[in-house]
Amino acid sequence: MASIIENIIPRQGFEIVLEKIAVILFEELTKQKSLQNLSDDFSVYIERQTAYDKSEGIVISVGLDNIDYNGKNQFDVQGNTTFFIDLYTTGDETLVLSGDDNSRFLTLKWLGMMRSILSSTKYKTLGYAPGLIGGTMVERIQNQLTYGNGDANFIKFARITFSVRIQENQEMWTSIELQGNDTTIKINETEKGFKLTFNN
C-alpha cells in the first residue's frame, strides 16, 4: 500500500515542550546562581542516559515519561504529558558538615529552586500563546531515591514529576519553539547526551 500522508510530519508538541522545560531551567537557575552568589557548578541535559560522575557537580536531566491522551476529536487531542526532572548532587566532607549533610542541603536547595521556577505563574503556559498549553503542575518531588552510593561519594538522586497539558493536532505547531532563545541557547550533542549551553 502506498503512503497517503504527503506532507512532512512536524515535530510534536511534547518534543518541543521537553526542550522548552530544559531551557527555562537552564536560564533561570543560571540567574539564581548569579543572584545568590552560588558557587555550585551545574549542567542541564535532555534525556541523559550516561551515569553521573561526582566530578560533574550538579547535573539536571529533563526527560519525557508518559502521555495520557483525552478530549480527542477529528482535529486535535489534549495530552496530559508527564516529564521527569532528575537531579544528581554530591557532597564533600568538611570540618563543619559531613558529606551526607552537604549533599542533603544541596539537594534540597536545588529542588526548591526548580519547584519554584516550574510553579511560577510567569510560566503557566511556558511562554507559549494561550491555547497550546492547557496548564502545568509540579505533581511530585521524590528525594530519597537510591543511586548506587556504595563508593561513599555521598551522591544523592532526586526527581521532580512535572505535568504539562499539551494541545496536539494534525496541523503545524504554530508557536515559536524557543521564544527568541534560539540565538542565546545551544543544545550540543555530547558523549553524555544533549547538553544545554549559552551561545557565546
Image (cartoon, grey):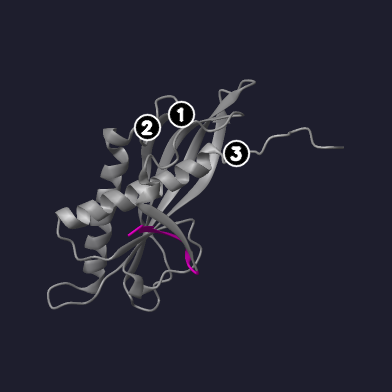
- Seen in the image, is 95 located left or right of residue 130? left
Q: Position of residue 99 (x, y in %)?
A: 24, 73
Image mark for residue 27: none
- Seen in the image, is 150 located left or right of residue 30? right
**80 over 87 or under it: above or below:** above
**51 over 182 or under it: above or below:** below
**Residue bearing the label numbered 1:** 132
Q: CA distance from mark 1 to mark 2?
A: 8 Å
Amino acid beneath label 3: Pro
Closer to the chain start, of discs 1 and 2, is 2
Looking at the rendering, in which quadrant would you find the N terminus? top right
Amino acid beneath label 1: Leu
**Residue bearing the label numbered 2:** 125
**Residue bearing the label numbered 3:** 10
Magenta region: 191-200
Instruction: Name the residue located 34 percent from the left edge and 51 percent from the top edge.
Output: 184
Q: Position of residue 75 (x, y in %)?
A: 61, 22
Contact between labelled residues 2 and 3, with CB atoms less than 8 Å apart: no
Closer to the chain start, of discs 3 and 1, is 3
